[in-house]
Image (cartoon, helix red, strand yellow):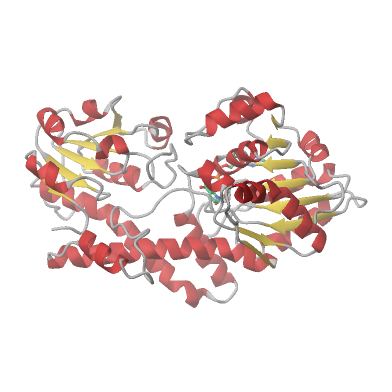
Amino acid sequence: TPPSGAQRPRLTFLGTGYLGATYAVCYAELGYEVIGFDVDQDKIAKLSDGQVPFHEPGLDELLRKNLASGRLRFSTSYEETAEFGDVHFICVGTPQRAGGLGADLSYIESAVTGIAPFLNRKALIVGKSTVPVGTATWVEELVAKSAPESSEIEVAWSPEFLQEGFAVEDVLRPNRIVVGVKSEWADAMLYAAHKGVFDLAATEDREVPVVTTDFATAELVKVAANAFLATKISFINAMAEVCEVSGADVTHLARAIGHDPRIGNKFLQAGLGFGGGCLPKDIRAFQARAQELGAGEALRFLHEVDLINLRRRTRVVTLAAELLGRPAGPAGPNLTGLKVAVLGATFKANTDDIRDAPSLAVAAMLNKTGARVVVFDPQGMDNARKALPDVEYADTLTAAVTDADLVCVLTEWAEFRNADPATLGELAASRKVIDGKNCLDAGQWRAAGWDYRGMGRP
Ligand code: NAD
């Protein structure tokens, strides 16, 4: 039972990036009164004006609908946000620290010490960002130091599992909710803060599993889940490496082992490996934290998972040199005078997120070989231009492919999967294609005269 006065707690989300903005919008949609807070004034101005500052399918519509409903607003004022909210969710970034593997917690620190001095009644601070185990306890200490003595602030942790590209659905219909709490009050408050999700599930005859646990376990659940997913991808990519030297086909192998329900066929696609703003930095921060705690050996395999993953990027460059008849010398391959079309800049389809994108990393490596690299992406162009200014960008798929000596498909956008290889063949200087995501119909491309190479396939 929720505590009195908390039937519908007022919610705030600190940090309106991919995670926080989606939450603010979706929880307003579920009927809560919400403030989304950020220190980035441009982001807040855009959101207040009904524009999502990034690409996430379905979010624009819901943003505009809920701004109009009056349940949702955005702010850059800690004071306003503190006064408004009963439950404050911390959704700020926790990137890899410059010069180390560990997580940079400075944004968590600034958000907590920014809001705490203005919290003058009982309220709950809930961490959602992905953090090293032990962070929630540190946040409690920060709050004790920076909140007014009279305020009764409690801390809880509720890690987040949404996937970009499916974020709206994942937030409205999560496959589980994990809460790390220390008191019945915090537990009840969090129940009330999620009741909209439970009510929606009930109307659809579903249940949302809830795991209630301690701080440390809640923090670990997230990094453990990401470590498992990264390991699964690197496992199949390691098999791809073996397939490449033995003439086997990793796509058949994955299908065959995936029929065993103990293994399962999800997240078993060999290709260019994982990237994005989560998996790479999370497995690194997890290793760094385990090391600090004296359990470094337990996670040594994650270093190997990371290496397997990064080797896939080099593999594309080697394959490109082979296909173009310019095998690497001691200084690496020299592709001067050749045009390479790189299709895809985002780390996966249906997002504009280019953080640690394997596709852009490969584009940068190809650029170093002297090739003229021309990148096209349906949504990621603005971000890519900023992150990798020294390659060329084409406005359309056809402009990228025109006169190319090699086409590399490095993000699995539907626009690339559905492209007609015969039409593209007319435009390219030479029909050579690397399918870095194993997402094309190899038979169809070969039938249209392309020399097709996948990852881990003969
Ligand atoms: P992001 O970089 O898109 O957003 C972070 C936001 O925090 C930015 O808008 C930034 O301006 C803001 N910020 C920085 N300092 C602030 C402060 N003091 N107060 C308020 N806002 C501040 O990052 P993201 O992808 O949304 O990720 C946020 C966290 O969620 C990370 O820990 C990430 O690992 C985790 N996470 C992300 C996803 C995902 O798919 N993106 C999924 C699960 C978990």
Note whether 130 is above or below 114 in the view shown: below
Q: Percent x, y for residue 22?
A: 58, 39
In the displayed orientation, state which residue is furthest to the right: 150
Give the quadrant of residue 62: top right
> 308 or 25, which is in the foreground?
25
| Quarter of the render that holds ligand 1 | top right
The residue under the point 60% across, 50% down is 201
Q: Percent x, y for residue 451?
A: 9, 45
> 67 or 259, which is in the foreground?
259
The quadrant in which the C terminus is found is bottom left
Q: Taking the image as drawn, is residue 354 in sight?
A: yes
> 188 or 186, which is in the foreground?
188
- Whether residue 193 sits left or right of residue 410 in the image: it is right
Q: Percent x, y for residue 47?
A: 61, 28
Give the quadrant of residue 457: bottom left
The quadrant in which the N terminus is found is bottom right
- Whether residue 87 sits left or right of residue 360 in the image: it is right
Q: Percent x, y for residue 223?
A: 53, 62
Give the quadrant of residue 251: bottom left
Note whether 337 is above or below 226 in the view shown: above
Note whether 29 is above or below 316 in the view shown: above
